[in-house]
Image (cartoon, helix red, strand yellow):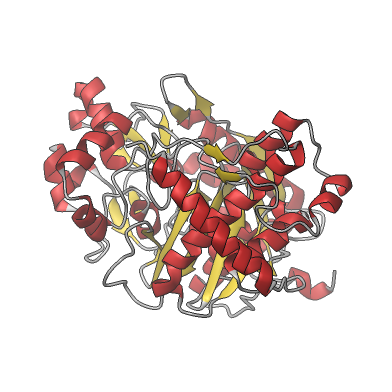
Amino acid sequence: MSSRASETPWVLTLDIGSSSVRAVVRDARARVLPGRGTGKAAAPMRAGEDGSAVFNPRQVLEACDSAIDQALASLGDESSRIAGVAIDSFGSSLLAVDTQGVALTEVLCYADTRGSAQASRWRGSLDERAEHDRTGVRLHASYWPAQLAFLLATRPELRTARFWPVGTWLMRQWFGPGAETASLSAMAWTGLLNRKSLGYDGIWLDRLGLGERQFPTLSDFAAPTRGLVSAYASRWPALADSPWFSPIVDGAAANVGGGAYRPGSLAITLGTTCAMRVVADHEPTALPYGLWQYRVDKSRPLVGGALTEGGGVFDWACRLTGIKPGAELEAALKHRKPGAGGLVLVPLLAGERAPGWNDAARGTLGGISLATTGTDLVASAIEGVACRLARLFALMGPISGKHPRVIASGGLLASEAWRHALANALGVAVHPCLEAEATGRGMALLALEALGCSCDWEPDLGRVIEPDEQRHAEYVALMDQQRHLEDSHKTN
């Protein structure tokens, strides 16, 4: 790596994920420092049979502290080159605190489904299209209205509590009273923000019987906090007076770091689950009903959708058939046309997020015969997910434009079968992102921008994956079959 890779200023990025926390120091080009400036600690999510999906806030804090300790220790005196700290966390997150900022609950995350019953009741009594147009999200257990309703119903004493995302709580621990702000990015992920006024949604607050004072003061990413409390100032002297930028959500950071930081570029994440997002060039007047609108910051609305289906469906098919991913499977799938085995899979094995947002939805497999093989099933898993992504891509059209640059990232891109399934199903060229840590890179870019630095926002991209016109036509036909099968087995 050239000497330019360590140009100052440096930025410390803190990525709070669903299993671990990573602290990484990046240089003025948003690149990881060679051989130093990193730290990692565990902060695992705990899932329960009751639908809970929670984190212990104290464990999250300890993991953050440990990761930062490691990163700074590896730098020694070089830590003085750090000019700012940027933080992202999983979205959304919710915990109740008392007036002193002491946690009264664990941190509920997006995967907590204990508010599903309430969300379902609202879908039957409210005009969901109006709710969606106002807040940018659907009525779903992932969001704060349903989670708050669950908490208040089961723990009435919380009615006088305050409710913060985890990033706000962490900032209070590090900076003390007065740091109880939350970024527009963090709160847009909750379903309590009015997407047009960028203030708290009064209709939901009245419905829940809560006041605006019970929620953090809204801020933007680039509005920093300075002045660590004494215990942390002595622990991290290099960061004591540095600007700490308001925590945002990891999906927004990943979009920026992966290359979809401006209108005209659309990002697709292919992992255990999948997501598709675009930075819109204006506030959407009419938001497509199956999508959500979040934010990177005040000036950058983020529109997209997330799927429960992805590599998890592929892993399920491989386990069921005993087929192992690898060269043999890739060879078997290389020249295969979509639907060749006669199978059509609706891959909703864990409920549905975009576009229908139906927790009760379940997968359906059609076309099974005595001739069906294990390879047919594995292929149908890839094809089923690709079809769902293509349907989401079509829904994104009014926001992304007719010819967006499509950038894809995630572990599934290592597979040629997955790469070509994506390009052929979408019918557009796909640019693989070679950035291994797009989230951290995005945080660094945003922080460098806030610090007044100019740098190259473009990530390293791999060889373009071009679609095959014939295969795309076959995917269009397969999508029609999938939609018909899904509709015929719809569960409300």
Looking at the image, can residue 442 be seen?
A: no
Percent position of residue 286, x then y = 27, 69
- 155 sits to left or right of 476: left
**Residue drawn 37% across the image and 49% down it:** 356
What is the number of callouts on the image? Answer: 0
Percent position of residue 287, x then y = 31, 65
Of residues 213 and 79, the one drawn nearer to the viewer in this rendering: 213
Of residues 29 and 68, the one drawn nearer to the viewer in this rendering: 29
**Residue drawn 44% across the image and 61% down it:** 304
Outermost residue toward the front in this view: 370
Looking at the image, can residue 382 be seen?
A: yes
Residue 284 in the image: above or below residue 331:
below
Residue 76 in the image: above or below residue 293:
above
Which quarter of the figure has residue 120? top left
**Residue drawn 53% across the image and 47% down it:** 233
> Where does the C terminus fall, quadrant-wise?
top left
- 115 sits to left or right of 47: left
- 328 sits to left or right of 186: right
Percent position of residue 126, x then y = 16, 45
Of residues 449 and 115, the one drawn nearer to the viewer in this rendering: 115
- 179 sits to left or right of 252: left
Residue 135 in the image: above or below residue 312:
below
> Where does the N terminus fall, quadrant-wise?
bottom right
Of residues 151 and 234, the one drawn nearer to the viewer in this rendering: 151
Percent position of residue 113, x then y = 39, 31
